[in-house]
Image: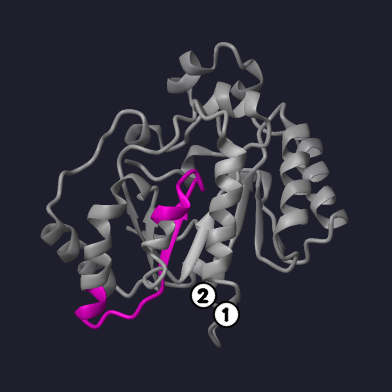
Amino acid sequence: MAHFGEEPFLSGTRGSGTIFFSGCALGCRFCQNYPISHRLKGQILSAEDLLLQVEQLIRAGVHNLNWVTASHYALDLLPVLQQLRTHGHTLPMIWNTSAYESVETLRTFSETIQIYLPDFKFWSPELSGQLARAPDYAQVAGEAIQEMLRQQPNTEFSHEGLLLRGVVLRHLVLPGHLKDSLQVIDYLAATVPLDLPFSLMSQYTPFPDLAGNLQKHPELQRRLTTYEYNKAVDHAVARGFSQILTQERSSATPAWTPDF
C-alpha cells in the first residue's frame, strides 16, 4: 500500500510504498499490527509475484519502498531487492524494523538498503522479557543500530525534503513505563549522533482483542497520558537531540492502523 502515516519525509505527498510481512522477530503483547504479527494473516507469494506487486507500487508513484518487519525473511528477500535494482528501479529502500536482528543479517543488506528505520522499544530486560519474550532486546538492538549507522552514517534529503539516505530512530512511549523510556533516551543519547531524526511516538493504542495478552499489565489497557509523553519529549530535548519528531495525542486511534 501507499502509506501516508509514516514520518512526513518518508510519506511525502504520494505515500511510502509499504510491504508488510506476516510474523515478527518479537512477540510484543501489545502489537498494533497483531492480525499479521500474531495471527499470521497474509498472502503467500512467490518471489516473482512479490516482485510484480512491488513494481505496481512503484508505478503508482510512491516515494520509496518500505519493507516492514521483514527480518525473518531476509535471506529470501535479498534477491528480490537486488532484482529490483537490475530492473532499473532506483527508489530508496527502507528497512523498517524492531531492531531485534543480528548484525550478520544487516551486513547482507549493506549494498541494498539506503534508509534504516529502527524502533528501539525497551531498556529493561525484565520489561522486554515480559512484553516481547526478548530479555536480551536492548543489547541486540543496540548492536544492530550501530551496524545501521556504520552502513548509513550520513542523513541526506532531496530538494523536496524527502529522506534519501540515513538512519531514523523511533521509540514508542508506553503507558505506565515512562522510566523505561527515559532510560532508552539516555542510552541513545550516549551512543548515537544527536542530530539523527528521532521520532518519539505517542500513538500507543489498546485493542480489545489484545486484552487477554495484557491481563498482567493493566497499565497497557489505557492510552498514554499527556504528562507521560511530555516528560519523554522534554528528556530527549534535555539530552541534546536536535531533530525530534513528535505526535499529537490524536494519533492514538485505530484509524491510523492499517486494516489488515
**Contact (CB < 8 A) between labels 1 and 2?**
yes
**Measuring 53% from the left and 84% from the top, which residue is drawn there?**
158
Give the position of the C terminus as an image quadrant: top left
- Depth check, front residue: 144 or 39: 144
Above or below residue 102? Residue 253 is above
Left or right of residue 129: residue 75 = left
Please give the name of the residue rendered at 47% of the width and 13% of the height, measured from the top-left corner: 212
Q: Position of residue 120 (x, y in %)?
A: 60, 46
Identify the image quadrant of residue 39. Answer: top left
Amino acid beneath label 2: Arg
Quarter in which the N terminus is drawn? bottom left
Residue bounds of the magenta highlight: 84-105
Left or right side of 189 for 202: left
Identity of the residue drawn at 59% across and 58% down: 146
Q: Secondary structure at mark 2?
A: strand
Mark 1 residue type: Glu
The tag on residue 232 is none
Question: What element does badge 1 sit on?
Answer: strand
Task: Identify the residue at image location x=64%, y=28%.
Answer: 125
Query: In which quarter of the view is residue 44 placed?
Result: top left
- Residue 165: give its label: 2
Using the numbered discs, state the Cα–Cα distance from disc 1 to disc 2 in whole angstroms: 5 Å
Residue 253: x and y in percent read 54, 39
Residue 126 drawn above or below residue 59: above
* Category of crowding for the residue at label 1, using alpha-carbon neighbours closer than 10 angstroms: few (below 14), some (14–19), many (at least 20): some
Determine which residue is flagged by label 1: 156
